[in-house]
Image (tube, rainbow, N blue to C red):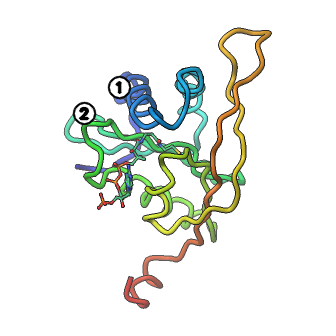
Amino acid sequence: MDIRALERRDRPQLPGLTARAIRSGCAGSYTRTQIAAWIRSHDADLVLRAEQVVVACAGPDVLGFAGVDTRRLVPLRFVFVDPPHWRRGAGRALVQALEQVCLDKGLAQIAVAAARHAQAFYASMGYEVVHRLQALLPAARSGRPDIGVDVVTMFKPLRPLEVRAQQGR
Ligand SMILES: CC(C)(COP(=O)(O)OP(=O)(O)OC[C@H]1O[C@@H](n2cnc3c(N)ncnc32)[C@H](O)[C@@H]1OP(=O)(O)O)[C@@H](O)C(=O)NCCC(=O)NCCS
């Protein structure tokens, strides 16, 4: 598995991967209406607007992707791994690559608005819950109210690799 910057040729694989990851991840944690709204909100624009997007890939196949925007209060924008490739370290490798982007930009901390089911994933990498909130996702049709989903804001102080090595982790 390689981690590299998103390339134009990767883009056709992203919408299907996103939908599969959200459907599998959210099942049991959110309603069908919430899941559908979540998938709609992660459109191509969101990916293109991110400052930096990295992909985990095996040859031409995209296994997962993640995006960061260091200009935002909550820089980590999205992390998606295709369900058949879960629990093989792709998500962790993607997040570590984006943490390095944040460090390179001089950020001392990183935050993410995590879905309920992703909390254990971020916690395993040292993220701590700051607070719980409702994110608003756009409704299916105009005129309908937006759809709220419970998420948790999680935060992690960042330390350069050389400091981690000195501290033995
Ligand atoms: C969350 C997600 C990105 C994790 O990707 P992944 O490639 O499976 O994660 P990793 O294999 O790198 O897991 C790293 C560690 O996180 C923890 N972890 C990951 N998934 C977990 C789960 N479902 N339950 C509990 N712990 C989990 C484990 O400690 C794991 O280490 P281990 O496998 O050695 O025990 C993936 O499940 C996903 O795409 N989910 C749907 C989309 C989503 O919710 N994205 C996040 C939105 S905020």
Question: If you read the primary sequence from the N terminus, does the residue marked by circle 1 or circle 2 appear first?
Answer: 1
Q: Name the residue under label 1.
A: 13
Asked if residue 44 is positioned above or below residue 165 in the image, the reply reads above
Q: Which residue is drawn at 70% across and 25% down?
A: 147
Q: Is residue 143 above or below residue 57?
A: above
* Cβ at disc 1 under 8 Å from ligand 1: no
Determine crowd level at label 2: few under 14, some 14-19, many 20+ residues with C-alpha closer than 10 A: few
Which residue appears at 38% of the width and 28% of the height? 20
Seen at 76% across and 13% down, the residue is 144
Question: Which quadrant would residue 130 be assigned to in this image?
Answer: bottom right
Q: Where is residue 117 in the image (x, y as percent from the top left)?
A: 48, 46
Question: Residue 149 location in percent, x, y?
Answer: 65, 35
Give yes or no for contact between labels 1 and 2 (Cβ–Cβ under 8 Å).
yes
The answer to whether residue 19 is left or right of residue 82 is right
Q: Which amino acid does label 2 sit on?
A: Asp
Residue lying at the far left of the rendered structure: 59
Is 16 located above or below residue 158 in the figure? above
Query: What's the residue at 67%, 52% (across, down)?
Result: 74
Q: How far apart are marks 1 and 2 (CA)?
A: 8 Å
Residue type beneath disc 1: Gln
Q: What element carries label 1?
A: helix
Mark drawn on residue 61: 2
Q: Which of 68 and 151 is in front in this view?
A: 151
Horizontal and vertical percent position of residue 35: 53, 26
Q: Residues within 10 Å of mark 1 (few under 14, many from 20)?
A: some
Which of the two residues, 147 or 98, is positioned nearer the viewer here?
147
Residue 108 shown left or right of residue 101 in the figure: right
Query: In this orientation, which residue lies closer to the viewer: 29 or 136?
Result: 29
- Identify the image quadrant of residue 111: bottom right
Give 21 or 64, whichever is nearer the viewer.
21
Circle 2 SS class: strand
On the rendered image, what quadrant is the C terminus found in? bottom left
